[in-house]
Amino acid sequence: MDHFQYRNGILHAEDVPLPAIAAAVASPVYVYSRATLERHARVFQDALKPAGDVEVAFAVKANPNLAVLRVLANAGMGADVVSGGELRRALAAGVGRDRIVFSGVGKTDAELALGLEENIGQFNIESEEEGIELSAIAASKGATAYCTLRVNPDVDAGTHAKISTGKAENKFGVPIDRAPAIYARLAALPGLRLRGVAVHIGSMIADLAPMAAAIMRMGELVGALRGNGHVVTHVDLGGGLGVRYRPDDAPPTPTDYGAMVARATKGWGVRLMFEPGRVIVGNAGVLLTKVIRVKPGATHPFVVVDAAMNDLARPALYDAYHHFEPVIETNTTFTANIVGPVCESGDTFAMARDCGVVGAGDLAVFRTAGAYGATMASTYNSRDLVPEVLVDGSRHAVVADRIPAATVMGAERVPDWLG
Ligand code: LLP
């Protein structure tokens, strides 16, 4: 459930009518709802209570805005980070350092050192090589790195190929059949306190079965590691739960997920860690846009909006569906191609979409834009970097300024020798 609802025919974010935000900030703009963020955090945490000792670290990559991170930190979430930049954001937002988990297949020596200097809670090591490097850096600093080994369970998450991470051919983790040997090697290194294993098989998962299969394999691995004499106290089960994008989508609920996890991990006797991203923030945000004009098309009219693929890349990258709705409710519908102004045909949000009718100057939203929206934005076509607004009841605040294309240009230099 989210807090973007029509009231008297006008789409609101909580108590704020979206036209008020367009008037104050202009479009395109991302709009987040604090109450929705808090609700999703609570629902997810409550859903996992049956699984026992649980720690939830929000996957910062899904929405790294500082205000969003602060809301989630206040709601009791840690942070799963994948770069020095995300690590600094988590700290700046007030996430407790012991609640920060550092994932990622390409952590540099500088990033590993930063994590150690900041005394973060856990490193999820993705290869034997990374573990050896982390050990050397930790030992040279006299520090201890608390770690898990990320394992690739070779399970097909059944999601888009570009966001699948748990198949043998994917770059993530160590192959599960090699995990015991690598674990033994890393467990013996100085500076590392290897305390368990981690897994994440992909994102936007619409079916619990592959997740259950991955968890089962992890359970067998934990048993094997213990059989080899290791003390295993932590298992990180990653993120990946899908959300509703289309009105008739019915993804597994956090409660279904929590019940499955509780069943599948019964008797493990470990602290379970989770790294949800999309399920927390996806439906807590919309991209507010304005129709520039409607032009005729060969099959359907083109609705040209002022948001583009540089603001919301998911449709162009993954053929992703984002529900499009006029801000002023209408009973009249038409079939349209919804496109942005960027100069390539990939800048298409929807083809032959049945939607409420809109005309030039009308406001509309792309729903479920709180995850992997603003964070993947660019300034392609020398467009401004899209701003972000957080709504809380009847108040709203700009939580990321629009960065004008001219400011970006201001960071560029033409060397003298070009004449
Ligand atoms: N943990 C790890 C190690 C991850 O790689 C990811 C996502 C997550 C947690 C969070 O997954 P979530 O709960 O959000 O599904 N840009 C793509 C999604 C990329 C996901 C990458 N990893 C999109 O827009 O669909």
Image: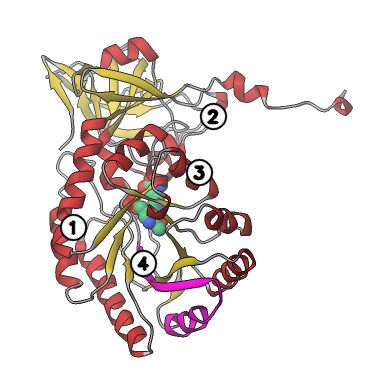
Give SS at disc 3: helix
Q: Which residue is mark 1?
A: 48
Vertical relation: 36 (above or below) 196: above
Q: In front: 336, or 166? A: 166
Mark 4 CB within 8 Å of ligand 1: no
Q: Quadrant of residue 62?
A: top left
Q: Which mark sits nearer the N-terminus, 3 or 2?
A: 3
Amino acid type shown at disc 1:
Leu
Q: CA distance from mark 4 to mark 3?
A: 24 Å
The circle drawn on residue 88 is 3
Q: Earlier in the sequence, mark 4 or mark 1?
A: 1
What percent of the width, then of the height, locates residue 297? 36, 24
- Residue 187 in picture, x, y percent from top left: 48, 79
Region in magenta: 178-201
Q: Which residue appears at 13% of the width and 62% of the height?
A: 50
Q: CA distance from mark 3 to mark 1?
A: 28 Å
For residue 87, above or below residue 347: below
- In front: label 2 or label 4: 4
Quadrant of image for the N terminus: top left
Q: Pointer 2: what residue?
A: 379
Q: From the image, state whether disc 4 or disc 3 is nearer to you.
A: 3
Q: Secondary structure at mark 2?
A: loop
Residue type of the residue flagged with mark 2: Thr
Amino acid type at circle 3 is Arg
Secondary element at tag 1: loop
User: Mark 3 and 1 residues: CB-CB less than 8 Å, in contact?
Assistant: no
Residue placed at 46% from the left, 80% from the top?
A: 183
* Labelled disc at residue 199: 4
Q: Can residue 361 be seen from the camera position used here?
A: yes
Name the mark nearer the viewer: 3 or 2.
Answer: 3
